[in-house]
Image (cartoon, grey):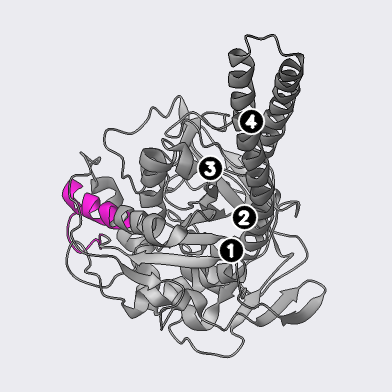
């Protein structure tokens, strides 16, 4: 993306964050049909860019990235892009502008290695004018309408991952709270949710669930499913910790899209999960970026660069903040310092890089989650079948007045099988030991 595009999400946010009132409601329904930025089968699809190869540079040397889009993915990804529009109205229109395509290439196209990516164009707020409740609701309603259309027309019962960043993550966080968390049929199809850079997922201090989401917990182990991941990255070169004026990681600042006021910071904290821990990489982050698209020059052959082994991530907490602390592995230099200086700021940290700095951790992570989710769905289907068999056996036994020994043995056998199937399905859905779905 161009340098002007690069700074829109960070500087525009910092200027406007303190001025944004809480959302009063979601009454500004969008009347337009969904325009898709990314969807299987459309032409000019930036999430299926086709140029996924490039170079891997590690402390031990360089090698080629042989990444390609999956020919027939078994699950979907629903992606909502960050604040990118250069339009000068309070809400952007539904044009498929070049800046939207460039950020989709960088943040979403690598997920096409494992999933079909859907991304609606939404009337995001632009910071060109003050962000009122109505302006924010118009943006959210566009995301909600796109998700509803995806479910009704394209999902066909498939499992999915939600992915968003910055403003996109804030709208997805609201959708998680108001739709997914409340509806088990949708929740059961969600493999996981990736929503960094917005401060909109919060939990009781030291807990994994119980803030704005009552049933969807934080992801705490690698193949956990039905869970959410959120973080904001700050680069700690000097070991000085979070800057005192940091905008992200705090409940008092950041994009806020929920009706009502903010939670009590003495009881709650912004969620931080570390994808580089969940993948079993001991916190080693693997940045992956299409630098040609980042600087506004897409279409380069093999444009991707991965940098495993140079940086370590760790979720840290302070009195009023929680964040993903990124530090250099001693003794190595990736050559990314100039780029990190360019995208970084004291208050915003490495906000623009929240996804790309762990992108090659995230793709393997959702792959493992999807495999586990498919296993759980099979167990859940088996449980449903056993429950139906048990109901029929109980009715038959009742009609026989409970005097048929064979029917009594069948009921007892099925009750045992149902109990075991419930335990297996519950353990598969919540391998962290949290509560099962309701």
Can the viewer see residue 199?
Answer: yes
Marks 1 and 3, how far apart at CA: 29 Å
Q: Which residues are magenta?
A: 125-143
Name the residue that disc number 2 marks. Answer: 326
Mark 4 neighbour density, 10 Å: few (under 14) some (14–19) many (20 or more): some
Of the numbered discs 1 and 4, the one sitting upstream in the chain is 1
Mark 1 against mark 4, which lies toward the viewer? 4
C-beta proximity under 8 Å, tags 3 and 4:
no
Please state the horizontal and vertical placement of residue 12, each as a whole percent of the image: 30, 61
Residue 320 at least partly seen: no
Disc 1: which residue: 357
Residue 316, label in figure:
none
Disc 3 or 2, which lies upstream in sequence? 3
Could you tell me how many numbered marks the image carries? 4
Residue named by callout 3: 188
Q: Examine the structure image and report whether residue 146 is included in the region drawn in magenta.
A: no
Q: Which residue is mark 4?
A: 389
Question: Residues under labels 1 and 4: Cα distance?
Answer: 50 Å
């Amino acid at each position: 993306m161009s340098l002007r595009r690069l700074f829109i999400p960070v500087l525009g946010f910092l200027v406007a964050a303190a001025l944004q009132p809480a959302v009063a409601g979601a009454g500004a329904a969008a009347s337009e049909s969904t325009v898709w930025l990314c969807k299987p089968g459309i032409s000019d699809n930036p999430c299926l860019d086709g140029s996924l190869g490039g170079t891997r540079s590690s402390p031990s040397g360089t090698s080629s990235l042989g990444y390609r889009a999956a020919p027939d993915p078994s699950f979907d990804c629903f992606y909502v892009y960050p604040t990118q529009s250069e339009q000068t109205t309070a809400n952007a229109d539904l044009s498929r502008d070049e800046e939207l395509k460039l950020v989709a290439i960088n943040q979403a196209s690598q997920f096409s290695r494992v999933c079909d990516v859907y991304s609606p164009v939404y009337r995001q707020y632009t910071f060109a004018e003050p962000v009122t409740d109505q302006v924010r609701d118009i943006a959210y309603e566009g995301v909600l309408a796109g998700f509803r259309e995806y479910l009704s027309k394209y999902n066909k019962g498939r499992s999915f991952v939600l992915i968003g960043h910055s403003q996109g993550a804030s709208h997805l966080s609201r959708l998680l709270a108001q739709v997914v968390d409340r509806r088990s049929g949708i929740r059961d199809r969600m493999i996981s949710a990736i929503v960094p850079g917005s401060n909109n997922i919060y939990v009781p201090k030291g807990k994994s669930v119980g803030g704005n989401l009552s049933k969807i917990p934080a992801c705490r182990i690698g193949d956990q499913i039905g869970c959410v991941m959120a973080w904001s990255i700050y680069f700690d070169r000097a070991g000085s910790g979070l800057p005192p004026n940091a905008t992200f990681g705090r409940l008092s600042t950041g994009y806020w899209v929920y009706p009502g006021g903010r939670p009590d910071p003495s009881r709650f904290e912004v969620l931080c999960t570390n994808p580089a821990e969940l993948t079993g990489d001991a916190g080693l982050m693997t940045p992956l970026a299409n630098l040609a698209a980042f600087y506004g020059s897409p279409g380069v052959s093999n444009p991707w660069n991965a940098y495993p082994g140079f940086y370590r991530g760790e979720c840290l907490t302070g009195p009023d903040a929680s964040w993903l602390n990124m530090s250099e592995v001693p003794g190595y230099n990736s050559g990314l310092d100039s780029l990190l200086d360019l995208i970084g700021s004291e208050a915003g940290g490495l906000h623009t890089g929240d996804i790309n700095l762990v992108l090659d951790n995230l793709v393997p992570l959702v792959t493992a989650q999807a495999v586990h989710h498919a296993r759980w769905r099979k167990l859940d289907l088996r449980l449903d079948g056993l429950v139906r068999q048990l109901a029929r056996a109980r009715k038959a036994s009742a009609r026989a007045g409970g005097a048929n020994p064979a029917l009594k043995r069948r009921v007892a056998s099925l009750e045992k099988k149902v109990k075991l199937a419930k335990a297996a399905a519950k353990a598969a859905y919540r391998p962290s030991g949290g509560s099962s779905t309701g």
